[in-house]
Image: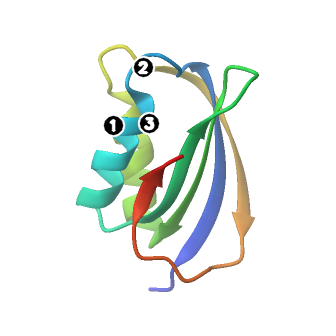
């Protein structure tokens, strides 16, 4: 199965609730690469790369966070790039 890269913008209660570090832990456990960062408008932006199924597992896992509350996610496809890790920016 081919790798994909997605830009995801998470809306809801996603800042100040451990979102980025939960994302990093889940992404690393699923073998995904990319990055995650807080935005000034209160959203969290992520670029994540890997197979489609683990990316969906990451998204489901984030929505199960105790304090995290995702209202909706904007999603775009991006070209795949060479990366080795998932990091918090």
Numbered disc in front, either 2 or 1 = 1
Mark 3 element type: helix
Is the residue under label 3 in contact with that under label 1 (CB below 8 Å)?
yes
What is the x, y in percent for residue 70?
A: 53, 24
Is the residue under label 1 in contact with that under label 2 (CB below 8 Å)?
yes
Q: From what the image shows, is residue 87 above or below residue 89?
A: below
What is the x, y in percent for residue 51?
A: 44, 73
Please give the residue where the numbered disc 2 appears in the rendered image. 68
Q: Earlier in the sequence, mark 2 or mark 1?
A: 1
Q: Seen in the image, is 78 located left or right of residue 60?
A: right
Q: Seen in the image, is 69 located left or right of residue 81?
A: left
Q: Residue at the spot x=29%, y=17% of the render?
A: 66
19 or 5: nearer the eye? 19
Please give the residue where the numbered disc 3 appears in the rendered image. 20
Q: Residue at the spot x=39%, y=67% of the render?
A: 85
Please give the residue where the numbered disc 1 appears in the rendered image. 22
Q: From what the image shows, is residue 5 above or below residue 8?
A: below
Q: Seen in the image, is 9 located left or right of residue 66?
A: right
**Looking at this rendering, what residue extends furthest in the left direction?**
29
Tell me the CA gap for discs 2 and 1: 10 Å
Is the residue under label 2 in contact with that under label 3 (CB below 8 Å)?
no
Q: Earlier in the sequence, mark 3 or mark 2?
A: 3
Tell me the CA gap for discs 3 and 2: 10 Å
What is the x, y in percent for residue 61?
A: 33, 39
Q: Residue at the spot x=50%, y=85% of the render?
A: 2
Bin the neighbour count of mark 2 within 10 Å (Cα to Cα): few under 14, some 14-19, many 20 and up.
some
To which quarter of the image does residue 42 belong? top right
Mark 1 element type: helix
């Amino acid at each position: 199965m081919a790798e994909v890269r997605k830009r995801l913008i998470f809306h809801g209660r996603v800042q100040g609730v451990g979102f980025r570090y939960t994302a990093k832990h889940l992404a690393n456990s699923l073998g995904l690469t990319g990055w995650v960062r807080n935005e000034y408008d209160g959203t969290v932006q992520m670029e994540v790369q890997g197979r489609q199924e683990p990316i969906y597992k990451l998204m489901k896992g984030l929505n199960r966070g105790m304090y995290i509350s995702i209202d909706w996610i904007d999603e775009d496809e991006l070209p795949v790039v060479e990366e080795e890790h998932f990091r918090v920016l």
